[in-house]
Amino acid sequence: NKDRFILEDLPVRISYKDSERVDAVLAATAGESWMLKERGTYLFHRIATGTVVWSKGAWINGILEKLDNLPDSFWIQWVESCNRRIDHLLSDLGAASLKGDALYFNLSLSGFLKTIAEVLFAVNHVFEPGPRDYTASLGLLEVLPEGFEANWGSLLREDAELPRDRKREIAELLARGIFSLTP
């Protein structure tokens, strides 16, 4: 649940988190089942970067401690999951390009770009921010594949001179760079 209001010309959003749900998701991070409970690490980002204005007890401090000490297996599983989705989305991009289906291509490209961002945050052990902050946050990451900025920029470019098939090729280059970052 969220509340939004204006306080002295400043927009304020308060997000209430169900502590039992957060506990369940964090408990599941020891295995792969957390991915069934939560799609991505945005929940963790909100908790880790949010400002606590009121708390009943020390629960939030314990959660922050757990988030600071997630095992490497958590990040490895998330990277592997993202890599599988990237591979699937590359196939979708190829099929859409071959069919000349603009909507299918754009939907596949959208999923591809989101998943590339997710995997880069995971490789860098950073919780993913909301999509509106991807551009700024990606620029701050220490580990990026070679040629990332050029390939990423080309995929974002809306240019009739850059046909879908060429964008698919660029996506494949970007994916190869991502796959090279992980064993």
Image: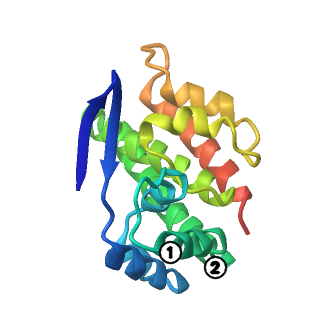
Viewer-closest of 80 and 44: 44
- Give above or below for 124 relative to 58: above
Q: Secondary structure at mark 1?
A: loop
Q: Tell whether 158 sits left or right of 30.
A: left
Identify the mark at residue 139; answer none if there is no mark. Answer: none
Q: Are circles 2 and 1 on residues that touch, CB within 8 Å? A: no
Identify the mark at residue 73; answer none if there is no mark. Answer: 2
Q: How far is mark 2 from mark 1, CA to CA? A: 27 Å
Q: Name which residue lies at 73% across and 35% down.
A: 147
Q: Name which residue lies at 47% across and 59% down.
A: 47
Quadrant where the image shows the N terminus: bottom left
Q: Secondary structure at mark 2?
A: helix
Q: Nearer the viewer, mark 2 or mark 1?
A: 1
Q: Tell whether 25 sits left or right of 15.
A: right
Query: Label 1: few (<14), some or many (≥20) within 10 Å?
Result: few
Q: Amino acid at mark 2?
A: Ser
Spot occupied by residue 140 in the image (x, y as percentages of width and height): 69, 38
Label total for image = 2
Identify the mark at residue 58; answer none if there is no mark. Answer: 1
Viewer-closest of 45 and 131: 45
Q: Name which residue lies at 23% across and 46% down.
A: 3
Spot occupied by residue 7 in the image (x, y as percentages of width and height): 31, 30
- Give above or below for 22 relative to 124: below
Viewer-closest of 46 and 30: 46
Query: Label 2: few (<14), some or many (≥20) within 10 Å?
Result: few
Spot occupied by residue 69 in the image (x, y as percentages of width and height): 66, 74
Quadrant where the image shows the C terminus: bottom right
Q: Quadrant of residue 48?
A: bottom right
Question: Could you tell which of marks 2 and 1 lies nearer the N-terminus?
Answer: 1
Q: Amino acid at mark 1?
A: Ala
